[in-house]
Image: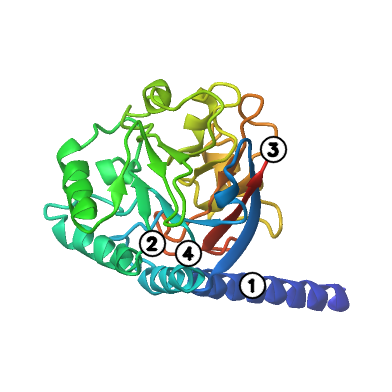
Amino acid sequence: MKNISQKLKYAGLGLLGAIAALTVWSFIEPYTLNTEIEVANIPNLPKSWQGKQIAQISDLQIGLWGDNRSTIRRSITKIIEAKPAAVLISGDFIYHSTPNPEPEIETAVNLVRPLVKAGIPTYAVLGNHDYGMSKKSAPPKTELANSLKTALESAGIEVLEDEAVKLRLPESKEILYLVGVGSLWANRDNVQQALKNVPDNSPRIAMMHNPDSFELFPSKSAPLAVAGHTHGGQVRIPNTPQWSWLRFTEPDQVYADGWAKGYGKPGNKLYVNPGIGMSIAPIRLFCPPELTFFTLQTG
């Protein structure tokens, strides 16, 4: 009986030790950075775009207590070193609207401004937090979003809302379209409007904040789509992106991290970036911040 009692005691102490270690690590992991290199197949991709890279970061969440500014700076440095053809930032620059959100906006813009200074074309969409929406039922704060958009565009970052732009390389006139869709929670994700001026069968990349907007794309209209919003689940079981806190708290989240297999209409493909920032608490567990590079090739 004494041996059993001792074994239970040691098991309990071991469990407490493991919990303590994981808790400590959850506050350290946000300062790591996972760099993913993915291949993206795009039909009718122009020859000049073959092998070019597009970088994506997401969910900076400036304003959360203990926000992740140092990791954001490292990701920006890595992008500048890699010199991709373009950078896509898929929303949630700030975490919440305060009585005076200007310092958060200024910080977020200053963090990404070096991309423009380095001569890398940089594009963005806004997320729900950029509208001051921490839940779907909250009314969107359009004035906050407009202030952020103005600040970003003043820094040289083009913010897309249900529109498409033509990407060109310095050495070529061949066009790759970038389709940007607005915030789903703010009811600004009009995919048909975004695709309105994109010719059929033209090469394109789609960018949105919320992965749920991807379902609205018609067949073969988004061969490469990128999104954020999920934070990869933020806390999850190792090597299992689908088993995270999202599984239990957000049943409508279709996919938290990486390629969303079997999702969306035929001919479309979505990649969900787990972001850099965090929600509620500045922790990540088995879900490090991510910088993603897509190498483009003909699909």
Q: SS class of the residue under badge 1?
A: helix
Q: CA distance from mark 2 to mark 4?
A: 31 Å
Query: Does 47 sit above or below residue 250?
Result: below
Label whose residue precedes the other's in the sequence (1 or 3): 1
In the displayed structure image, the side of residue 232 where residue 169 appears, left or right: left
Label annotation for residue 16: 1
Q: SS class of the residue under badge 3?
A: loop
Label whose residue precedes the other's in the sequence (2 or 4): 2
Q: CA distance from mark 1 to mark 2?
A: 48 Å
Q: CA distance from mark 1 to mark 3?
A: 37 Å
| Nearer-the-camera pick, 251 or 68 | 68
| Nearer-the-camera pick, 163 or 262 | 163
In the displayed structure image, the side of residue 20 where residue 164 appears, left or right: left
Looking at the image, which residue is at 43% across and 70% down? 80
Please, what is the three-letter code of the amino acid marked with disc 3? Lys
Label whose residue precedes the other's in the sequence (1 or 2): 1
Query: Does 255 sit above or below residue 235?
Result: above
Label whose residue precedes the other's in the sequence (1 or 4): 1
In the displayed structure image, the side of residue 127 where residue 20 appears, left or right: right
Q: Quadrant of the C terminus?
A: top right
Looking at the image, which residue is at 65% across and 28% down? 267
Q: SS class of the residue under badge 4?
A: loop
Please give the residue where the numbered disc 2 appears in the rendered image: 120
Neighbourhood count class around disc 3 (C-alpha, 10 Å): few under 14, some 14–19, many 20 upward: few
